[in-house]
Amino acid sequence: MKKLWILILFTLFLAACGQKELEDPVDWETGSFEATTQAKESFSMESMEGKVWIADFVFTSCNTVCPPMTRNMAQLQKKMEEEGVDVEFVSFSIDPTVDDPKKLKSFGKEQGVDFSNWTFVTGYDQQTIESFAKDSFHIIVDKPEGQDQVTHGTQFFLVDEKGTIKKYYDGVQDVPYEQIVEDAKIVKN
């Protein structure tokens, strides 16, 4: 009987070791969303089904956090490639009246973006992106009347293949690159 218990415990131990799980996933659902990419192509949340992706919210005339966030995301993109983790990247413009596809493409190039698996989107109105950010990603996006700067969250969001936001991370300072890569690996499995 003792040998049977040892075998059962050993089997349970091996099973637990083989399956990693995300710590404290948020499990927020993304809503429906349609946009235009930096390549002037259609984009929708449905086009992301079946893909694991990392999202953020930026704008091209940002004079504070958006350039370093985008460079940090570009570094994350390289780390994912080095680790062989197949993920997409999506940057939502939070100043869509200013950020046309041409400006988004130029901004991305300036920040070292590889567009092979990174999409910048625009082509909606300000209220749409503010509501989408609040309802789906639980962050504030606010462009005060008459201002050229937009207040917004600075997180990177890990989204699974079903469109569920699993985790979020600081995208400006002390970006936890290794943790994001490891979490993306878990979500992909």
Image (spheres, helix red, strand yellow):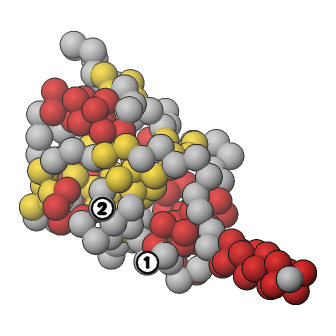
Q: Which residue is mark 1?
A: 86
Left/right of residue 80 with respect to residue 123 in the rendered view: right
Q: Is residue 58 above or below residue 90?
A: above
Which is more toward the observer, 80 or 62?
Answer: 80
- Say what amino acid the circle numbered 1 marks: Asp
Q: Which mark is residue 162?
A: 2
Q: Is residue 185 left or right of residue 102?
A: right
Percent coordinates x, y for residue 146 in the rendering: 22, 14
Disc 1 residue crowd, few under 14, some 14–19, many 20+, Cα 10 Å: some
Mark 1 vs mark 2: give the one in front: 2
Residue 33: x percent and y percent?
Answer: 16, 48
Judge whether residue 26 can be spotted in this image.
Answer: yes
State the SS at label 1. loop
The answer to whether any part of residue 67 appears in the image is: no
When the figure is inspected, residue 47 is found, relative to residue 59, above or below; the finding is: below
Q: CA distance from mark 1 to mark 2?
A: 15 Å
Question: Quadrant where the N terminus lies?
Answer: bottom right
Does dot 2 land on a helix, a strand or a loop?
loop
1 or 2: tag closer to the N-terminus: 1
Nearest the viewer among 102 and 8 is 8
Q: Residue furthest top?
A: 145
Q: Residue at x 30, y 22 (%)?
A: 142
